[in-house]
Structure formats: structure tokens, C-alpha cells
Image: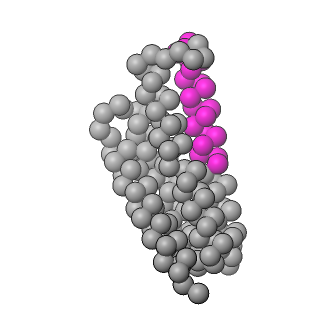
Amino acid sequence: MDILTNMTPVHAAALYIGLLIFVMLGLKFYVGGRRGALKVPSGETTPEFSRVTRVQLNAVEDVPILAVGIAGLALLAMPAWYIHIVGATLVVSRILHAVGLAGSGGFSLGRLVGTIGTMLVYLAVAGALLVHAFTP
């Protein structure tokens, strides 16, 4: 646990950005695997495959901008503990959302918790960036 508590803000940001890249890579493999299993040619879709691609596209909507935001927090020297909180929340939220949506096109607890967690990270990152942008 000392390794996490002794990280600089830049190291903490690098940790979570790296983990988010692995989440995105996992989603890419998931979509590719399902495309092959469902025998859907490139450029084509089916109702079932449309939901599969939605799993990846939902993450594409949120992860890049929040990764940039986490890097911004590090550049503004936000405390590493804060970056750990938003980074871990985002990683867990995106995994829960992906698992929930992959399992069901309708309501799922994973999708709900993942969405709420992601929205909280948006607020925490944007708020901290705005406040610290004007703090000497």
C-alpha cells in the first residue's frame, strides 16, 4: 500500500491512465471477439452486434476526456490521493458499465452504478480543474 500513498500526482495519473488504456483494449478485444463469433462482416451490424459495439462506444465517449482531465489534475499538482479517488472510481465505473451493458440491453445494476460513478468523476475532475486553474 505504501507504493500508492508515496506516489506523486504525475505517477498517480499515469497509473490510472494506463489502467484506462487497458480497459479500452479489453473492450476492443471484446468487440472483435463478438464480431467473429456472430460472423458480422466489417462495416455491417445486427441488432445484437449493435449493442456489443455500444459497450465500447460508451467508453469512447467518456474515457479520453476524463483521462485528459486526470492528466490536468496532475499538472496542477492536485494531491495524489485525489487522483487515486477519481482514477479508481472511473476505472471501476467503466468496467461495471461495460459488464452491465454487455449482459443486458435493458436495465442492469452495473450499468446504473457505472453511469453514476462516471458522472461523479466528471464533476470531481471538472470542479477541481476549474477551482485549481484560478488558485495560485
Coordinates of residue 58 in the picture (x, y in percent):
47, 41
Residue reaching furthest to the front: 134
Quadrant of residue 122 within the rendered picture: bottom left
Q: Can residue 100 be seen at all in this image of the molecule?
A: yes
Q: Dividing the image into 4 quarters, which one contains the N terminus?
A: bottom right
Coordinates of residue 90 in the picture (x, y in percent):
50, 57
Quadrant of residue 73 within the rendered picture: bottom right
Asked if residue 120 is positioned above or below residue 47 in the image, the reply reads below
* Magenta-span inclusion, residue 121: no
Q: Can residue 1 be seen at all in this image of the molecule?
A: no
Q: Main secondary structure of the magenta part?
A: helix
Coordinates of residue 15 in the picture (x, y in percent):
66, 61
The span picked out in magenta is: 21-40
Coordinates of residue 44 in the picture (x, y in percent):
53, 15
Way the structure is coloured: one colour
Asked if residue 123 is positioned above or below residue 79 in the image, the reply reads above
Q: Dividing the image into 4 quarters, which one contains the C terminus?
A: bottom right
Residue reaching furthest to the bottom: 136
Residue reaching furthest to the left: 107
Q: How many marks do you count on the picture?
A: 0
In the rendered structure, the answer to whether residue 54 lies left or right of residue 135 reads left
Seen at 54% across and 50% down, the residue is 63
Residue toward you, 6 or 8: 8
Seen at 67% across and 55% down, the residue is 18
* Magenta-span inclusion, residue 34: yes
Asked if residue 28 is positioned above or below residue 77 in the image, the reply reads above
Seen at 61% across and 39% down, the residue is 26
Residue toward you, 50 or 92: 50
Residue toward you, 39 or 69: 69
Seen at 45% across and 61% down, the residue is 121
